[in-house]
Image (cartoon, rainbow, N blue to C red):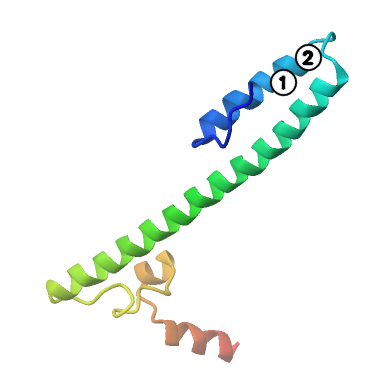
Amino acid sequence: MAVQDPNTFDEVKARLNEIVEAVSDDGLPLDDALALYEEAVALGLRASDLLESDLDAADERAAVSSELARERACLEGRPSADENGFGDRSEDERRDGAQPAEIGRAVDSQ
């Protein structure tokens, strides 16, 4: 019995494990093995879709979090990371106090 359109990655994985166990049986008819193979391929695609949607959701949460941080900084009267120039600078550049323009001039002069 096949699980139709599992809703979680764990459900997909569990069904794939069941399929692996079933096809390991030497007495499994070829037609049944082929049907299980086709189901496994569909489950692999479903797992990919689930993982992609999780990544998209994480990207959306990160964007919202960044926007909230900018709004909070604005309400508190302090510049956000992008406004104070830290947004495009490395940790070493911030720690050393080098400004992005100074770094560019130093590289150009060499």
Q: Residue 87 carries which label?
A: none
**On the image, which quarter does residue 70 sit in?**
bottom left
Residue 12: where, in percent of width, then height? Answer: 58, 31
Distance from disc 2 to disc 1, alpha carbons, whole Å, reads 6 Å
| Left/right of residue 80 with respect to residue 37 in the rendered view | left
| Left/right of residue 8 with respect to residue 70 in the rendered view | right
**On the image, which quarter does residue 25 sit in?**
top right
Residue 65 to residue 73: above or below: above
Q: In the image, what residue occupies the spot 56% across and 37% down?
A: 5
Q: Which of 88 and 102 is in front in this view?
A: 88
Residue 40: where, in percent of width, then height? Answer: 71, 32
Q: Name the residue under label 2.
A: 24
Q: Is mark 2 on a helix, strand or loop?
A: loop
**Mark 2 near mark 1, Cβ–Cβ under 8 Å?**
yes
Q: Mark 1 points at which residue?
A: 20
| Left/right of residue 15 with respect to residue 75 in the rendered view | right
In the picture as drawn, the residue positioned furthest to the left comes out as: 76
Residue 74: where, in percent of width, then height? Answer: 18, 75
